[in-house]
Image (cartoon, rainbow, N blue to C red):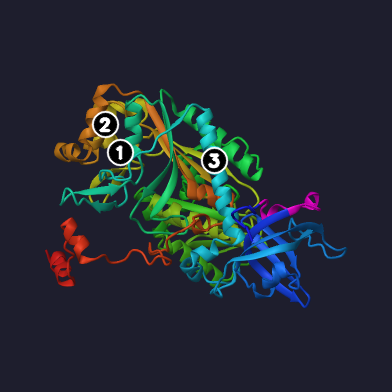
Amino acid sequence: MAFLKTLKRTHYCGGLRKEHVGKTVVLMGWVDTRRDHGGLVFVDLRDREGIVQIVMNPADPQIASAHSVRGEFVVAVQGSVRSRPQGMTNTKIPTGEVEVEVSQLQVLSEANTPPFVVDDPKVSELLRLKYRYLDIRSPRLQNNLTLRHKACKIVRDFLSNEGFIEVETPILYKSTPEGARDYLVPSRVNQGTFYALPQSPQTLKQLLMVGGMDKYFQIARCFRDEDLRADRQPEFTQIDIEMSFIDQDDIMDLNERMVKTIWKDTIGYDVKEIPRMTYFDTMNTYGSDKPDLRNPLKLRDVAKVVSGHGFKVFDDVVARGGAVKALAVPKGGNYSRSYIDKLTGVAKQMGAKGLVWLKEENGAISSSVSKFFPPEQLKKIYDEAGGQAGGAVFIVADDFDVTCASLSALRNELGHELKLIDESVFKFLWVVDFPLLEYDAENKRWAARHHPFTSPKDEQLEIMLNRDESKYPTLLAKAYDLVCNGYELGGGSLRIYRQQVQAAMFEALGLSEEETRLKFGFFIEALSYGTPPHGGIAWGVDRMAMLLCRTDAIRDVIAFPKTAKATDLMAEAPSPVAKEQLLELGIRLATPADAGKSKQV
C-alpha cells in the first residue's frame, strides 16, 4: 500500500460532514475505541480535529489486519463516506451523521497499553504530567492549545496592522534585579561569570525605543525562579509591547481594542467598555488590586462607627492608623459556629489575628463582640457595613494591607460558596494610579512597586529629583494593570526616559553609584543619547489562554508544564549533570558540610 507516498491524507477525522457523503477520503490518526461486531469492526478514529466512526470488514484482504488494531494504534485508511443508518446517528459529536466504509487499511504504528485512558477525568494530574505526550492527545488539551495558538495569531495580526514590529530579544542576558530570583547560566568561555535568563525583556524593549524602533512587540519567553501556584510557572510567555511618543490613554486604548478583538475572534464574546479605578479605590472597595468584578460583594470602612466605644482591638488599630473594614454577606444569618470558624481560618491565613462577626435574625443583632457594644451600637455597625435582613457582617481590624487581603480572601470564598459569580461572563477592569514605591521594613529601604523604570506622575517629579524621602509614600506611578475575573492579565507603565530621573529612582531604591553602574551602567548611558517618551505593557499569554479556555489551572494551557515544585515529571528535570560538565564550567558543587559552614558564617 502506498499510504504517505501517494495516498496522502485528504481530510481530518473531525472535519467530515453530511456534505462529504459519496467522497473517497484518506484519514490518518489514532484508534480511540474499537468494537468488534463479528463480521464488522467499528473504530472511532481520532486526530486533533475530532473523531469519526470507520467501519471495516476483515474478510476483505485489503483490511485483513482490522482484527488486530487496538487502542492508540496509529492507522491510515482509505474509504468512502456514507450516511449512518437510520437511528444510528450520534448527536454528541459533529461527525455523528456519517461514517467511513474502509477499503484500505495500514497500521502505521502499534502501541503498548497506555497507563491511562486518554481524556479520563479521573486520572491523577501527576500521572498525566508524567505521560504528558499521552495527555496531549485528549480533546481537552488539544482544544486548549489550539485556542491559545489562535489568540496569539490574532495578537500578531492586530499589532502588525497597528504598525508594530516584532523583534526577538536575547534569552542569555544580564542579571538585573526585577523583583524575583534570576535563573543563572554559567559561561564556559568566560569562567566565573554568568548570564541570566530574562525575567522580562524590560530594559531591552526600552533600548529598542532609544534605538528608534517606535513600536515593538514580541511574544516573549520569560523566566523567574519563584514559588509556584496554580496561575504561575517558572518559565512563561508574555505579549510584550512598547511604543514611543504616547501617553497613558494611548496604550490603554490600544490594549482595550486588542482585548475586544481577541475575545470576539476566538470565542465570540463581546467585551464591553472597560471601567477604570484607582488602586486605592479598588483596594478599599474589593480588598484586592485584581478583584473579580463578577462578585457583587464589597467592603465598607467602619472605623468611625466601631471606634471610641471601649473595644481595645478596634480602638488600638484606629489609633495607629490601621484599617477597620467590613464585608456584608446576604443570607449569612444562619451560619453555624463551625462555618464561621472556617471563615476565620481563611482570614487568618492572610494575616488577620481574628474575625469579628455580626448576624441579624428577626430584627435582633448577635455578635462575637456583643459584650463590648450595646444593642443600638451593634445595629449602627451592622447598618454601616451594609448588612441585610437575615444576613451577616464580618469585620477585620489590622494594618491596611492585612485587612484588605483577609477580607478579599473571604469575599472570594463566599462569592463562590453563595454562587454569586456568573461563570459565563468576563469582567475586565483597568487599575491605575498605583503607589510608585513601597517600604521594605525587613531590609529598611524603599522598593519599586512595579519595577525601577516606572515613571512617577508628572506633578510629582520634583519629589523624586529633590530626593524628598518624607514624601515618597505619596508618589504615584504612571502604571496600569488590566484585570479579568480576579486575575492580573497584563501590567505596564510609562517609563522614565530622562537620565537624571532614572538616577534619582535608583538612589531612592538604595542603590549606590557603584551598584547602579555595575547593574545598569549600559542603560543609564543609553538614556543620555536622546530618549523618546515611551511606555508599554506585558500580558501573560498563559493567563490569557487560561481565561479563554475557562479553566483555573495554568497547566491546562501549556504543552509541557512544570509541577508546583518546578519539576518536569515527564523528562525528570532538573537532573544532575556529569562532573566533567561542571569542571568545564569551573563549578564545584558544595557538600552538605560546606552548606552548613556557609550558614554559620
- Name the residue tied to disc 2: 502
Cα distance between the residues tagged 2 and 3: 36 Å
Q: Secondary structure at mark 2?
A: helix
Residue 463 in the image: above or below residue 92: above
Tell me the amino acid under the disc marked 1.
Answer: Pro
Q: How far across and how far down the image is residue 310, in percent? A: 42, 58
Cα distance between the residues tagged 1 and 3: 32 Å
Asked if residue 422 shows in the view, the reply is: no
Eye-nearest disc, 2 or 3:
3
Mark linked to residue 452: 1
Toward the viewer: 247 or 204? 204
Residue 439 in the image: above or below residue 315: above
Mark linked to residue 153: 3
Q: What is the magenta range?
A: 10-24
Q: Are marks 2 and 1 in contact (CB under 8 Å)?
A: yes
Q: How far across and how far down the image is residue 216, in percent? A: 42, 31
Toward the viewer: 284 or 498? 498
Tell me the amino acid under the disc marked 3.
Answer: Lys
Residue 426 belongs to magenta span: no
